[in-house]
Image (tube, rainbow, N blue to C red):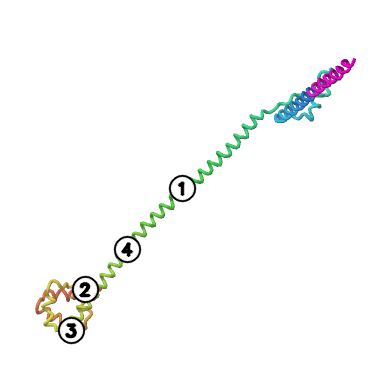
Amino acid sequence: MENKQKEKPKKGSGKRFLRIILISLIVAIFLLGVGYIYFEYNRLSYFNLNLQNGWRSYLAYLIDFIPGLRNLSNYEYLEISDPFYLQKELLDTKLKAIQDKREKLIAEQNELQKLLDQVSQESASLMVQREELEKLNQDYQQKIAQYNDYNTRINTLANWLARSTPQQIANALSREEVSVELLVDALATLESKSAAEILQALALVNPQKAAEVIAKMGEKRSE
């Protein structure tokens, strides 16, 4: 009797364990079902479907099968847009906008390049003009230096002529090294009396050169 009483609790505990396993399986299946429904709901929402208002469509669908109530509803299948197609169109639109912007930037870059080329050409032209001006300035400075040197020589010769007697200086002035122009410019700085005495002395030594000096002095006075 005692052994039979001890076996009864063991059988009751085994049934309880099986019951717990079954309940756990049912709960697990229920949770999996709820999770799957939630998954499908999210997936259908991704395809632009709304299950919250789907019961109206379902009622309209059932009414279409009842002969007397068909005219009360007008059920039509909704055309579901392909999200991948919509995404592709969106990407194409963005790519086109990017391409248009790229072409616009390229056009602006070309315009800037044209401006840079124009500036470079103008800069090159300015450099050429600057070089020409520098060359003209150098020529001018060189002529100024030559003019100053010539004036220095004339003043030196004029002082020398003023301090010398005409008879003593006539032989030196008659030489070829002393040009007619230099002699004319030097005599122009002297007093008329001194210049006339020198010309008279030069005429005695070299009449031809004296005549050239007189002719040259006449030309300069006429100018």
Q: Is residue 63 magenta?
A: no
Q: Which residue is mark 3?
A: 163
Q: Amino acid at mark 4?
A: Leu
Query: Does residue 29 appear to the left or right of 159 in the view shown?
Result: right
Cα gap from disc 3 to disc 4, whole angstroms: 40 Å
Q: Which residue is mark 2?
A: 219
* Image quarter hosting the C terminus: bottom left
Q: Is residue 43 above or below residue 218?
A: above
Tell which of 84 and 147 is nearer to you.
Answer: 84
The image position of residue 50, as x and y in percent, is 76, 30
**Mark 3 vs 1, N-terminal side:** 1
Q: Looking at the image, is mark 4 or mark 2 nearer the viewer?
A: 4
Q: Amino acid at mark 1?
A: Gln
Main secondary-structure element of the magenta-colored stretch:
helix
Q: Which residues are magenta?
A: 1-24
Residues marked 2 and 3 touching at CB (< 8 Å)? no
Cα gap from disc 4 to disc 2, whole angstroms: 30 Å
Query: Does residue 177 appear to the left or right of 220 in the view shown?
Result: left
Residue 70 at least partly seen: no
Q: Quadrant of residue 85?
A: top right
